[in-house]
Image (cartoon, rainbow, N blue to C red):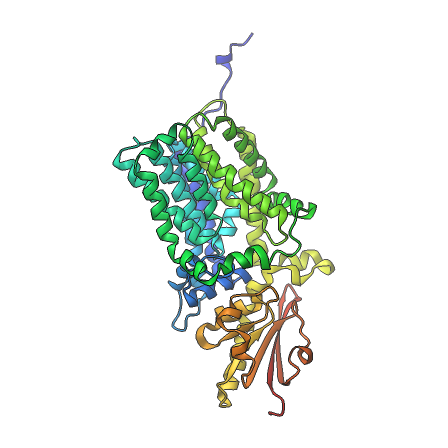
Amino acid sequence: MTDETDVPQKPPLDVELLAKIALAISVVLLGARLMIAEEVGFGDAEALYAVYALFGQATYLDHPGLVGWLGSLFAGANGALEPVAIHRFTAVAATTLPWLGGLAARGAGASWKGVIIAVISLLIVPELAVGLFAFTPDLPLAAAWLGALGLAAVALRAEPSSTRAFGATLGAGVCTGLACASKVSGVLLAVALIATWAAGPVRARLRTLSPYAAVVAGALVTLPMLLRESSLGWPMLQHRLVNTQVGFGPSLRNLGALIGGQLLYLTPVIAVLVVLLAIDLARRARQDPIDRLLFNVTVLPFGALAVLTILSRVAEPHWVAPAYLGLALHLARRVDQTPSVLGRKLSIAAVATSLGAIALVFAVVLFPVLPKVLGKSYEPKYDLINDLYAWKPGAKLVEANLQRVHDAGIDDVSVVGPHWIVCAQLQAALGRKATIGCETPEGDDFQVLHPRTQWEHNAVLLYVTDDRFPVDMAKAFPNRAVQGVNRIGIRRGGVLVRTIRVVQLGRMGSS
């Protein structure tokens, strides 16, 4: 019989080698992101957040206003944001965030090997690698969430009455406030932290000033948001929880969207790893305060957001993504322990499939892959990538029409669109050169900022739409005469993917 010690063992990956791998992945991803940044415009949601930068409000109908404040740092002279500048920023930020996750893992007590494993895991998850390149509230939310986890873990590893524990707990409170100011789901992070401080042996920390100071600090960060919402009758909650919730209730469609979304955004292999990590964390949740912290910030947000996704037709599967961040820290803490939570082959498969998925998405964004591959079955209106390319020429067409109206000596003019998707692209591109009216059926911020009562009597309306939003002008504007129509078609891969029309409407009887 061969002694077990005689069997050749595979040497563990050296920490230095892992660090080089993490750095190489970061450099390649940064290069790809910067390449894409030079080519694309804003997606629909990105354009809306770029509009936030124009107005500087603490809240809007869809989200709190922190993302708008970030965007204002890149605003031009007339308030417009250049997609290239914003995407260069998000490219750097998305590449930096996994390293912030590594710092959070170190704060949670992970070894240096665990830190690098955490960095690699956050680098390769497609939902982060692709999604955080976009200019959305998810980017500051993810950074604030990881900051809160790392600082809360540092505090839990320190003596409850120490200065270190107080400072770290206070920092966790500030980061949690920033998470709430990024996206409403940040409130679930606050609930998870409070649940951690109030449970088990950690409860002794309630006899110190730290948790109360953290709550006050977080509340102060969110105070502008709370004051604005309360003074207006909570319009964001009304919009998100009532106005947009037609058909609210559980459905197999919503459940399928939740499960399918995770498989798509994570890849099936990463989804399996997430389940394995969650099970392992649940088994260890009572062993020490850090495990309890990571369990709470995983299970509580995921449970609440998953239920909401199953009930709401307008919920999006990526809403649950912040709940996965704690699992990266758990993985980092477990890499040096036995038995291993993840197998070597499964881990390698996760890295390979994830990098392949990221490369595929980047290729589809940069090149007209879908129109060519899908052929006659391709439906341009469902391909949101087209909007990254359509509104650069579309906005130039609108600006040219607006200039012609001004050259004719008419300043009493507004630009109007049928839906916030169109209106956001227009306002983001034109900045303060034009006021934008909008008619989204469920309501939108434009109807508050520039209501119909302010633009419907203008001498000229420039009505802008694309082929996703057909409008019967005679029915929509019975007291208006069409004075001219200009259009531009956008092609990708030889396929007409968008047609943007600008209809000039004047008062009846005017030329």
* Residue 119 versus residue 466 in the image, above or below: above
| Residue in view at x 61 percent, y 56 percent | 245
Residue 461 pos. (x, y %): 56, 81
Question: The N terminus is located in which quarter?
Answer: top right
Residue placed most toward the observer, 77 or 310: 310
Residue 258 pos. (x, y %): 62, 45
* Residue 306 versus residue 32 in the image, above or below: above
Question: The C terminus is located in which quarter?
Answer: bottom right
Task: Judge whether residue 340 can be spotted in this image.
Answer: yes
* Residue 130 versus residue 502 in the image, above or below: above
The residue positioned farthest toward the right in the image shown: 376
Task: Judge whether residue 39 can be spotted in this image.
Answer: no
| Residue in view at x 44 percent, y 46 percent | 26
Q: Quadrant of residue 68?
A: bottom left
Asked if residue 219 lies left or right of residue 327, the reply is left
Asked if residue 74 lies left or right of residue 396, the reply is left
Asked if residue 194 lies left or right of residue 380, the reply is left
Residue 44 pos. (x, y %): 55, 62
Residue 439 pos. (x, y %): 59, 70
Q: Quadrant of residue 259?
A: top right
